[in-house]
Image (tube, grey):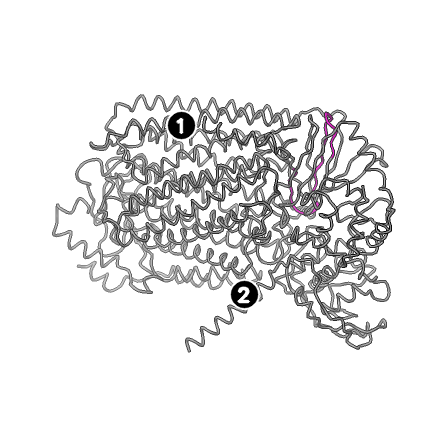
Amino acid sequence: MGIMASRVLGLCAALLCLTACQRETRALTGEAPRRSETPSGQQMAGGGLAPPPVDPAGAAFEGVAFEISEGQRYYDWYNCYGCHAAGGGDIGPALMDDEWRYGSSIAQIRASIADGRPNGMPAFRDKIPDRQLWQIAAYVRSMSGRADKLAASSRTDDMRTTPPTNQARPGPEQSDTSGGEVRR
Amino acid sequence: MTAGQDLEPLEDEALRERLERVWAHPTGWRGVLTAVDHKVIARRYIATAFVFFFLAGVLALLMRAQLARPESHLIGPDRYNQLFSMHGTTMMFLFAVPVMEAIAVYLVPLMCGARNICFPRLNAYGYWVYLFGGIMIWIAFAMNVGPETGWFSYVPLAGPEFSPGKRTDFWAQMVTFTEVAALAVAVQLVAQILKQRAPGMTLSRMPLFLWSMLVTAFMVIFAMPAVMVATTFLITDRLVGTQFYNPAEGGDPLLWQHLFWFFGHPEVYIIFIPALGMVSQIVAAFSRRTILAYPAMVLALLANGFLAFGLWVHHMFATGLPRLGDSFYTSASMMIAIPSGLQIFAWIATIWDGKPRFKTPLLFVIGFIVIFVLGGLTGVMLASVPLDLQVHDTYFVVAHFHYVLIGGAVFPLFGAIYYWFPKITGRLLDERAGVWNFWTFFVGFNVAFFPMHILGLLGMPRRVYTYKAGLGWEVWNLISSLGAVLIAVSMLIFIINVLVSLRRGKVAGDNPWEASSLEWATSSPPPIYNFLRIPVVTGREPLWEGDKLPVMSGLGETERESLCVSIVEAEPDIRQKSAPPTVWPLLAAIATTVLFIGSIFHEWAVVWGAIPVAITLCGWFWPGRPTRKALKERSA
Amino acid sequence: MIRRITRLAPCLALAGCAGVQSALDPASDQASSVFGIWSLMLWICGVMYALVLAFLAAAIWKARHRLSGPPIAEGQKSPADRPLTRVLTGWVGLTVVGLLVLTFGSFLVDRQLALADQKNAQTIKITANQWWWKVEYDDPVPGRRFVTANELHLPVDRPARIELEAGDVIHSFWVPNLGGKQDLIPGRTNRLLVTPRRVGLFRGQCAEFCGLQHAWMALDVTVEPQTAFAAWAEAQRRAPAPPSTPEALRGRDVFIGAACNSCHQVTGQPAQGQTGPDLTHMASRPSLAAGARPYSRQALDEWLRDPQALKPGNHMPLVATRADERAALVAYLDTLK
């Protein structure tokens, strides 16, 4: 019994440690993550094959505080503000709501940024290095509360336009990429 | 033993038996968890603080290893930033302030001739909170969640945008832990020193160590709230997006600096002033002469305490504050050299006119004078706005504050350990090892830190994980790293000396140094009730006054009681009950820990976590009925 | 004091040969004034220190044989009480006088720095970012303004008014040979006045901890005669000569086709990125990556091959992954003179 309890405790501690380690990692490398780009086979709303909702490369960015923070910086640097504002949307769609036409997984968001989407979203594949694409995708997910709340930052040092990012409550994940009919 | 012993030997035996029963504390695990005796708590406090000291020392060695060569790849920037942040944080928050307070917790009640510290449960609570806070930050560090923005964590670098994750939150909450603990001790020291001294120990007869702790405790009470406010603002900025430090929303990064340094500068004196008290005790005991110019010394301590609050802006000369205002802080910073210089002179004069025996504690005091005066003089240089603008945030400053803090606080502390170790353990530390300990430390320290002055003048900024070759810094850095190794050797000698002497040291006896203050009037180590009879003080040096120390009677013997006296004249005033062993402080500390750690992760933890804290506090203060046994003994 | 002099002597000697980042080798009015107050401090504090040490040594020497006898408690007057108290008073008086001299001297120097002559000053705006310096030369004629990065050219004998701002966190601008430091704080503009008096190459470095690459955030400063400065400024205003070799031409295509121009700016090319250092004349600068390496083609190649190996955590991504692309890019960037 005692041994059992201590094992369970040890396991919990190890798990806690692993999650914390993952969340706090600062991978100071420039290497692009290796990934396989086999499309899911699903037809997307704007034409073309949808990316797979899960990509092993995304795990190194998903919910990692440092990567989200870097993504926040590049979101600004590459002027995502220009269309999406601070996430509330402007001439581009809002990123802090629950509507995801092209899927809400990190891999799908990355693909949307990299390949562009119909009605105005340019393809940034050649303009943003792959690593930074992943970082931006990780940050975009955090805007709607989809990243680990403990990894997202509360605010930037700019004018306040949105509620604290780490207080956002996420809606259901949407891996469906079939178009705008989702929800309402 | 107390002087009353040979007058009424029979009654003494009965009294001893009775006091032992009344003040007895449980043994085994229960005893560990419920202890409220100030000596037990203080021993743990000192040991814990030294563990943190050695851990932070290891971090310093790692940094020196990285900096020994230019453009070294031993440690990357991410880890290095955590190393220096943890080194500074541990040394300042988990070692320097706590160890000074810990020694005070041990000595102040004894020097006051009291049976226990005035708020024993608060004392236990303070220790547990400190311990849990220290463990928390070190576990966080081991899990790669250690602080990364330095011990003064300037915003916006430490703010939500530039310090992602929970690293800075752990740091900020650790500050809260240690400040709560420090405040808990501070209020006790004030109450103890002002209200629970031995009868006859008027303010003008108080040992200088008590004066220094009184000043320190008041400084803690005024300085610590500022940093707790600052770190709480930081946590709310990071957790719920408040805008205290965001200039775009009307906040101000300089607000952090003002709040932090309003604490941060007095903090240095909170570490340093207790050391002044220790030095005064050691100099008097080993020179066998009362300290010269006692009233001037007391006034100097008070002046140090007051002036320390007027200096904080000299950490901010480079931020572009108004020039004329800066000059005010220049003169205030220069002024504090006057009381410090006076004290240095008085100690040397005391040695001059005394009959000094150059044992290890006095050696450390002499080392203190040699090192600290140099650090004080570079402090005078740093007070000058134009000169500070050159050397601010360089290795010159690193050299300066290590000269002041190691020279001004750690050397006296080591002297104090050699001096009071026999009182605490009943055994003397080995003298030969002590001399080796001193010389290796003294030489190692100067080799490690003197070159840093030059490095600063040659343009090396602090907090760099590496540096460019060819700027003339290589040789000084290498020398400095070698010095660090010598300090490590010295610390090893110290640890071995302590461990061996604990078992096999020479038995000390009550007063091995023939010193004069009250703690030497009882046995070594003191009995659980400290003094068989409460001593009465008739002069500034009670044990040098005559053959016998007068004692008083009238304090309860069937219940835990302590004596309150009037503040100035120390005339017996009232009898006050002293709390028995209890587990509630520990439970309250655990509840506090849950609240503090929880609120790193979730804002509502403040609300839900307050409930267990309230419950444990209710249990703590629940009025107890006197036990039947106590009633019977009282009627007998 | 003698010990201090002997200890400082090698340092001063050393400053002579390696003084590009040294407060002991002043090259401007401001640094000279500070060096003056430093010397005054060193002397006064040195004498004070010597006095204390001498008194301590004398006390130990005098007391070394008196070991027995009862302790002197309060009230048992020692014959030395009165003279010692007198000397103590004298010592405090001496301290006060010394501190007054230093405070007053410091105040005068500070006043001198604050009231320095600004006539005909060159205004330069410096913005610090993690972890590089953006340097903008102001001019009454808008077309004559220009931008550079991680280098500062100053005309000798002409005051420079440097305006300091921060793009992200707090940094501190510090060129020891030219004067004291001044913080760059988000939301504020600080000013620093420098009047260089000696031609030479100097090095400055960020002095306020600013994150992962605080160690490699340096600035090359060139103080040059006014004519040379004017020529340099004129060259900075012009776009660099277009690439001529096939490899450099290909490199330009890589530069414009890949992510480089998202962050970097090159005048005369479709590269208008504002978030990274301006590269218009990068090949003419003394160093690379904010002082991390002296500029050379090999260093540039090393930097592009793995920016994170040289400066872990900095924001320069890996762009040209193929060796031939990188070689072309290096060839192009090397033409930006």
Task: Give the residue at x 51% y 62%.
Answer: B609
Between the residue at mark 1 and the residue at mark 2, the CA separation in whole angstroms equals: 54 Å
Name the foreground residue: A27 vs C173: A27
Q: Position of residue B407 (x, y in %)?
A: 42, 39
Helix, strand or loop for disc 2: helix
Q: Mark 2 belongs to which amino acid?
A: Cys
For the N terminus of chain A, the quadrant is bottom left
Disc 1 vs disc 2: Cβ atoms closer than 8 Å?
no
Q: Read off the residue under disc 2.
A: A17
Task: Indicate which disc residue C168 carries.
Answer: none
How far from the left and from the top, in percent, is residue A152?
65, 60
C162 drawn magenta: yes
User: Residue A56 lies in magenta, yes or no?
Assistant: no
The residue carrying pointer 2 sits among few (fewer than 14), some (14 to 19) or many (20 or more) residues within 10 Å by Cα, namely: some
Q: Which residue is mark 1?
A: C52
Q: Is residue B613 left or right of residue C311?
A: left
Stretch in magenta = C153-173
**In terms of secondary structure, where does tag 1 sit?**
helix
- Say which quarter of the image contains residue C51: top left
